[in-house]
Image: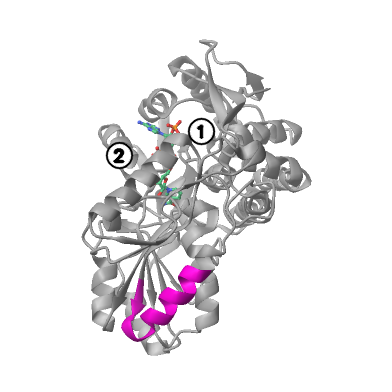
Amino acid sequence: MIKIQNYINGELVAPQNGLYLDSFNPATGQVHAQAPDSGRQDVDEAVQAAQNAFPDWSRCSARTRAGYLRKIADLIERQLPQLSEAESADNGKPLQLAREVDIPRAAANFRYFASAIEQFSSESHFMEGQGINYTLRRPIGVAGCISPWNLPLYLLTWKIAPALAAGNCVVAKPSEITPLTAFLLAQICREAELPAGALNIIHGRGETAGEALVRHPQVGCLSFTGGTQTGAQIAGRAAPAFKKISLELGGKNPNLIFADCNYRQMLETTLHSSFANQGQICLCGSRIYVEETLYKKFRHDFVARVKSLKVGDPLRAVHLGAVVSKAHQEKILAYIELAKQEGGAILTGGKAVRVEGRCADGWFVAPTVIEGLPNRRRANQEEIFGPVVTIQPFKSESEAVNLANQSQYGLAAILWTENLSRAHRIAERLQAGIVWVNCWMLRDLRTPFGGVKNSGVGREGGFEALRFFTEAKNVCIRY
Ligand code: NDP
């Protein structure tokens, strides 16, 4: 049994209350690790360590900080097999996905922000004959970073890399459901000899450790990725203390398919955008709208392809592994039942899958396609965050855009058409922070990442992230 520890002031330490939480392997349903059930005292200690480390860390050169980040990236790459196995065991995702996407992208996050901080520049404003202003971008101090369970190491590093690069010290709280790779990252940081206190990782529950971090008066900014309800709670706590916040929240993303698309490429990518990571990616396209003239063909081919997807032991060559927890499996199945009550017909899937052998007690759900569910029904409006999509036809471009925008969310949208004018026209009209045209999850780390409406506040990625983790100070000099 792996016993996970907190990482405070460069040391791996037990929680002060001595309490631990069981961590399950979703594919087997068995406990495979224990993680600290940290309380306020642990958070206080971590914030204190971060504060103590801040003067030195923030004053060392960007090049020095970048050097540490690159060292961490190298070590992540060197430990790719162990990290991938841990991520798959903790989350239920296919090992191959962890090896090809999650872990390499975690290393890429460190590498990218190491370069970005070396390129980051500020502005100056010249006042003819009078003087000059220049903008200093200084780190905030202690940054709180809270991340979810679906892409555990990838999303954790997406926050801590820019925060550290910009000169902040960090207290991070990964999801209690998937703590393992954050623990391995702490070991990597020790190996990289990252200065003590620059990064601190506290494990524990959102309502205790997370809450203490959010409320801590010495935490100057909060970067959060997770559910919309939790995000609203955090915003409510942060606002009276005037903390800077960045919230990356839920989505219910539309996938608009026009008859003039590159059909083969669209079908292949739509399988991924619907079911990658068991549909547990905030960017998955879960509402599929298809132009009426193509609908029958798409329905036939898509359902046939979904039926052929393999669900099973994440260590084998499967398309879908386990969903993250028993509670989450129950939530997904309850939404499928709701969709049926609301008038949806299940074309394939719609139930739990039993996998033989070591995964007999694991939590699996069949990839599910639902037809005929009216757009405004709950199952078409609320985030299910599982391998469930709905399909429906549309007649015109404006109907497609209206259906897509009829949502409280606005994270991402996917658009399939070979008509250039239409692509630009619709991309402009879609209420979303990210629009993918003829692709999905093609990521360039320099681009702004985030959502509109109930999908969040602020942007991550590129210089946007470095701007979030710094305060702008204007210096005005008179001649
Ligand atoms: P949650 O909101 O439940 O949890 C996210 C993190 O916040 C976890 O570390 C959690 O801890 C912690 N937390 C929970 N309550 C509090 C609190 N009161 N104060 C401080 N921290 C708290 O989300 P999930 O982990 O269930 O993740 C799934 C959600 O994340 C989905 O809605 C998904 O769309 C969204 N997401 C958004 C992305 C984006 O970029 N927009 C990307 C990926 C996911 P613990 O787990 O220990 O309770």
Of helix, strand and loop, which mostly describes the magenta segment? helix
Ligand 1: does it lie within 8 Å of the C-beta at label 2?
Answer: no
Give the class, few, some or many, for how many residues have Cα within 10 Å of label 2's Cα (few <14, many ≥20): many
Q: Residue at x 41, y 53 (%)?
A: 350
Tell me if 476 is positioned left or right of 150 in this view. left
Tell me if 249 is positioned left or right of 313 in this view. left
Name the quadrant containing residue 183.
Answer: top right
Locate residue 343, reporting x and y percent. 24, 59
Residue type, mark 2 in image: Ala
- The circle drawn on residue 235 is 2
Magenta span of residues: 289-304
Residue type, mark 1 in image: Ile
Residue 159 in view here: yes
| SS at circle 2 | helix
Q: Nearer the viewer, residue 133 or 166?
A: 166
Q: Residue at x 37, y 53 (%)?
A: 458
- The circle drawn on residue 177 is 1
Reply yes or no: does residue 24 show up in magenta: no
| SS at circle 1 | loop
Which quarter of the rendered picture does the C terminus lie within? bottom left
Tell me if 431 is positioned left or right of 83 in this view. left
Locate residue 305, reporting x and y percent. 53, 69
